[in-house]
């Protein structure tokens, strides 16, 4: 009897710990922030969008220059606002998430980024 109770306890503990370690995705903003997104081309240009604990970072690198917008972020179902304190500016992007891709729009410019890596919570 003790072995059965012990076995059920171990299985329950295992299931409980497995449930706590996985990130639940229940909305479009959750899916957006659960991953990093990036794109590179044959000319050496790289664009990366990543999220961590309520902050967002958009990095743009070319062969000779690098730009980074980062700060606290507000994300809803179709837009991202990044408040960059170092640049003293707010940047607003529209986005459309579909499958493993995101279309990110700033003013009249659009770039398509690919899902890259799972972000830690």
Image (spheres, helix red, strand yellow):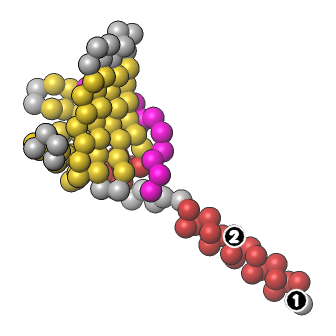
| Residue sitting nearer the eye, 71 or 23 | 71
Q: Residue at x 32, y 13 (%)?
A: 63
What is the number of callouts on the image?
2
Residue 37 percent across, percent down from the top left: 38, 35
The residue positioned 66% from the left and 70% from the top of the image is 15
Q: Magenta part of the protein: which range?
A: 111-121
How much space separates mark 2 and mark 1, taking CA atoms? 18 Å
Toward which corner of the image does residue 9 lie, by quadrant? Answer: bottom right
Where's the C terminus, which quadrant?
A: bottom left
84 or 74, nearer to the observer: 84
**Sequence-wise first label, 2 or 1:** 1
Quarter occupied by the N terminus:
bottom right
Label 2 element class = helix
Task: Using the rendered image of the protein, determine whether residue 71 is visible from the camera's viewpoint.
Answer: yes
- Report which residue position mark 1 lands on: 2
**Residue 14 bears which disc, if any?**
2
Disc 2 crowd, CA 10 A, few/some/many (<14, 14-19, 20+): few
- For residue 76, above or below residue 95: below
Magenta: predominant secondary structure element? Answer: strand
Q: Position of residue 55 (x, y in %)?
A: 29, 51
* Residue 76 percent coordinates (x, y): 22, 53
Residue 102, visible in the rendered structure? no
When asked about the image quadrant of residue 84, the answer is top left
As for residue 119 lying within the magenta part, the answer is: yes
In the foreground, 80 or 97: 80
From this view, report whether residue 19 is shown above or below residue 88. below
Left or right: 115 with respect to 95? right
> x%, y% of residue 69?
22, 37
Q: Most extreme residue toward the bottom, as rendered?
A: 1
Which residue of the protein is positioned furthest toward the front in this rendering? 86
């Amino acid at each position: 009897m003790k072995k059965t109770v012990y076995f059920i306890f171990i299985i329950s503990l295992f299931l409980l710990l497995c449930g706590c370690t996985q990130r639940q995705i229940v909305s479009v903003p959750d899916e957006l922030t659960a991953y990093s997104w990036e794109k590179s081309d044959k000319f050496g240009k790289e664009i990366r969008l990543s999220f961590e604990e309520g902050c967002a970072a958009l990095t743009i690198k070319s062969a000779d220059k690098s730009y980074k917008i980062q700060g606290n972020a507000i994300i809803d179902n179709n837009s991202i606002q990044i408040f960059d304190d170092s640049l003293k500016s707010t940047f607003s992007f529209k986005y459309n998430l579909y499958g493993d891709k995101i279309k990110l729009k700033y003013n009249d410019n659009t770039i398509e980024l690919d899902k890259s890596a799972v972000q830690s919570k």
